[in-house]
């Protein structure tokens, strides 16, 4: 009996040791430097996590010096948790398309849904109390130790031929922008960090904007009319609205309402729908956190990205440029609706109607650059 107990104890300790040995201690920057070397591995990293408008990311403690300085974060399929982005756009080869897509990791990830995870998810989904329009804004970021499986892109995020046709979709997360994704297995050392929104006092005033009766696509079309016909502003807003197509039209754009915070295996395969350009554009909006004008602006934002991805001049746009352009269209949408302010997650002011004419362009650019680099971890 004692011998059997000793053998059982020894075997258990060996199993625990081997399981621990399979977890690679590393960092966000190390993974981003050589994502293919971590593909399919279970890693443990310390990072700051941001969940906002179209972000659900793990950032390193300092800039990695890359065009994308973050890893996309995903919960295992079926988690049904709260935190994550409120608007995303993902690309998938259509049934009639020839583009390839990188497959996801094969190993199953089971989430440890303990008190640490619940604290983590609750902090990242707690909305900030703000009367002004601030799409996807939450009260906290979180620092934590994350353990999970890494999926890596098998090449450039989106590959095109000389004509601009998309031939491969490799990237992960929103806009298929990210070279690596961590599918969460467990979380520890959770520390919420409250975000300072006080630098935008104007956003504390009532500012509901005009959502045109709750129809966000109609609102996007109407917003274009606030600018002179034929102007670049009007054209950008109209193209964003037109990207969704007419009612009943099958144009390869699929709009869904709900969360997009989970790893979904079927998203990494060819779709069952056909599309005019061989690509399906999945736009997802979390209605519970996008109210009134915020939903209309989110639709304009994603519509701008779809329009530019399908543009005849698509080879002139990299994915970071698309994101920058989409935010500028979002600001135009806010201006067209007569909003006093527009704030991005993290407290970055992108529009304030009290700005003087000469300062408006400069202030928008400064706010957007700060948001993209510091909050979204995009750009060198």
Image: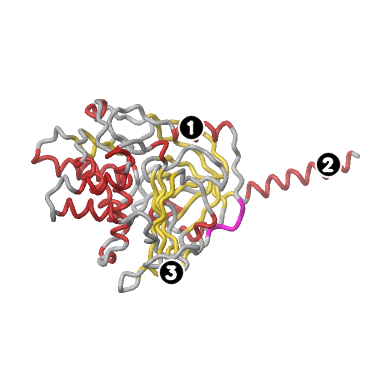
Residue underneath mark 1 = 122
Q: CA distance from mark 1 to mark 3?
A: 38 Å
Residue underneath mark 2 = 6
Neighbours of disc 1 within 10 Å: few (<14), some (14-19), many (20+): some
Question: Horizontal and vertical percent for residue 130?
Answer: 31, 28
Question: Horizontal and vertical percent for residue 56?
Answer: 42, 44
Q: Is label 1 or label 3 in front?
A: 3
* Residue 199 shows in the view: no
Question: Which numbered tag is attached to residue 316?
Answer: none
* Residue 112 shows in the view: yes
Point out the stretch of residues depicted in magenta: 104-108
Q: Nearer the viewer, residue 280 or 75?
A: 280
Residue 210 occupies which quadrant of the picture?
Answer: top left
Residue underneath mark 3 = 99
* Magenta stretch: helix, strand or loop mostly: loop
- Earlier in the chain: of badge 1 and badge 3, it is 3
Residue at the front extreme of this rendering: 248
Please state if 300 lies on the left or on the right of 87 as rendered: left
- Earlier in the chain: of badge 2 and badge 1, it is 2
Question: Horizontal and vertical percent for residue 29?
Answer: 42, 50
Q: Is label 2 or label 1 in front?
A: 1
Question: What is the total number of numbered labels drawn onto the structure image?
Answer: 3
Quarter that holds the N terminus:
top right
Q: Magenta segment: does it hold 148?
A: no
């Amino acid at each position: 009996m004692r011998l059997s107990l000793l053998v059982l104890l020894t075997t258990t300790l060996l199993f625990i040791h081997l399981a621990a040995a399979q977890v690679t201690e590393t960092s966000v920057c190390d993974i981003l430097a050589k994502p293919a070397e971590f593909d399919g591995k279970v890693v443990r990293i310390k990072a700051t996590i941001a969940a906002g408008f179209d972000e659900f990311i793990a950032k390193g403690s300092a800039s990695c010096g890359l065009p994308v300085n973050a890893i996309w974060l995903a919960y295992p399929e079926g988690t049904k948790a709260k935190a994550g982005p409120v608007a995303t756009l993902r690309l998938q080869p259509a049934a009639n398309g020839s583009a390839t897509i990188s497959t996801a990791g094969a190993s199953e990830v089971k989430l440890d849904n303990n008190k640490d995870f619940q604290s983590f998810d609750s902090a990242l989904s707690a909305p900030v109390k703000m009367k002004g329009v601030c799409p996807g804004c939450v009260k906290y970021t979180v620092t934590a130790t994350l353990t999970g499986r890494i999926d890596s892109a098998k090449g450039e995020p989106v590959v095109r031929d000389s004509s601009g046709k998309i031939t491969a979709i490799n990237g992960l997360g929103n806009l298929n922008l990210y070279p690596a994704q961590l599918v969460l297995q467990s979380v520890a050392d959770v520390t919420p960090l409250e975000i300072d929104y006080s630098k935008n006092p104007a956003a504390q005033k009532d500012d509901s904007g005009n959502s045109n009766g709750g129809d966000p696509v109609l609102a996007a079309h109407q917003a274009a009319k606030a600018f002179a016909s034929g102007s670049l502003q009007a054209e950008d807003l109209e193209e964003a609205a037109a990207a969704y197509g007419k009612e009943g039209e099958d144009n390869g754009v699929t709009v869904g309402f709900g969360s997009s915070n989970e790893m979904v295996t079927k998203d990494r395969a060819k779709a069952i729908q056909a599309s005019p350009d061989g690509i399906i554009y999945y736009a997802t909006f979390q209605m519970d956190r996008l109210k009134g004008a915020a939903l209309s602006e989110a639709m304009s934002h994603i519509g701008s990205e779809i329009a530019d991805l399908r543009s005849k001049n698509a080879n002139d746009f990299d994915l970071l440029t698309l994101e920058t352009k989409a935010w500028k269209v979002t600001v135009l949408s806010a201006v067209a609706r007569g909003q006093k302010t527009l704030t991005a997650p993290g407290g970055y002011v992108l529009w304030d109607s009290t700005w003087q004419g000469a300062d408006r362009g400069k202030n928008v650019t400064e706010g957007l650059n700060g948001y993209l680099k510091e909050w979204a971890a995009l750009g060198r």
